[in-house]
Amino acid sequence: MDVDTRTTLPVRPRSLPGLPVLRRRAGEIQVGLDPAHAVVISDLPDGVVTVAGALDGTRSVDELLDEVGPADSDTLLALLDELEVRGLLVDAASTAVPARLTGDVTMSVLRTRGRDRPVPPAVRPDQVVVRGDGPLAVAVAATLAGAGMRRVHVAATGAVQPEDVGCGYLDAHIGLPRRRAARDVVRAVDPSVLTGPPRRGSASLVVLTDAVVPDPEAVAELVRHGVAHLVVRVREGTGVIGPLVVPGRSSCLRCADLVRAGLDPCWPAVATQLLGATQPVDVLSAQVTAALAAAQALRALDWFAGAGPRPPTWCGAVEIDPFTGVSRHRRWPIHAACTCGAKTRMT
């Protein structure tokens, strides 16, 4: 292996945190457990197998080569190169991610198979606004903060109610303004998170939670400013995440209403009665829905940044019933009668 190839290797190689390096039989190792990610590498000398199982980032490439000796140096370099190409190595000399986020970074790399590695949320300029007056809003915001988002603002009105408790709000928060209580919950997860509101129209993503039918005026403002938004709610025990709306590019919430009205002519009358309504939600459904919503929000931000595939909530929604364990994907296509303009610009 030539010098140019070696310069692409990490200075101090470390196996992707949390991914086990296991011996299978003589001269063979397995990296990872899940068939979707695991790789088996054979025909390795004993010295290389030993080094592969101890890539903890404390030694440089040259030190590792000295350990195996000249006879096995090319084999070790080839192994390191393969692991690097697959995204299974990190550089301990430059990795600056909080220890609690090592699992998040590992899964981000595995899900993109080492390509287009997402930038850790903590070092991105993204700002997420979570808007909602129920338990989902604080649960989504706290989960995003826990996953490393540095800028999370909760836009909520009213005071915390007893039925809001259990997903982030505490009994001590009952009666306090939701916005203040949500800020305290987020900062309890990570005191470094910036919780102030963004400038109008500057949010990277707005997550609309809790309301069965979001406030049309709030949605219209987001569309007017071109702000991407993700709808999240629980419908009688079923968590619904989506659609993800990118104004002018994806289907919009009016597209979804037109599709619904085509299937049920009474939907407009029903929807009018549900405007802004927050349904009671059980804690388990709220927590599962919030976790999935936060994951889809981060995936959307990765996609906006050019890393990773388009999320399943694009022109669609993911529905999950925590009780039955059943999930489904529902399409919400662009409607020809909608004036959102996406029918001629979908990308």
Image (tube, rainbow, N blue to C red):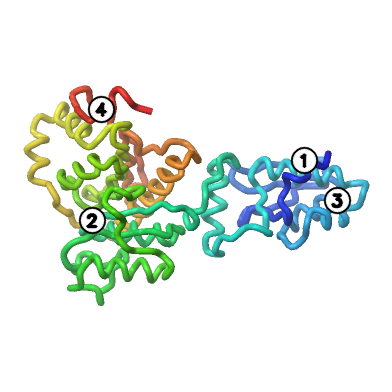
Question: Reading the chain from its start, which is encountered first: label 2 or label 1?
Answer: 1
Residue 233's place in the image compared with 190, above or below, is above
Label 4: element kind: loop
Question: Reading the chain from its start, which is encountered first: label 2 or label 4?
Answer: 2
* Residue position marked by numbered label 1 in the rendering: 5
Label 3: element kind: helix
Judge by depth and name the residue closer to the eye, 13 or 262: 13
Tag nearer the camera, 2 or 1? 1
x and y, in percent, of residue 87 in the image: 64, 44
Q: Residue 46, labelled with which disc? A: 3
**Kind of residue indicated by mark 3:** Asp
Residue drawn 34% across the image and 56% down it: 140
x and y, in percent, of residue 305 in the image: 46, 42
Would residue 301 be found to the left or right of residue 10 on screen?
Answer: left
Question: Reading the chain from its start, which is encountered first: label 1 or label 4?
Answer: 1
Mark 2 Cα-neighbour bin, 10 Å: few <14, some 14–19, many ≥20 = many
Residue drawn 86% across the image and 43% down it: 74
Question: What is the C-alpha distance between the residues marked 2 and 1?
Answer: 51 Å
x and y, in percent, of residue 235 in the image: 22, 47
Check if mark 3's residue and mark 2's residue have beta carbons within 8 Å. Answer: no
* Residue position marked by numbered label 2 in the rendering: 132
Q: Residue 341, labelled with which disc? A: 4
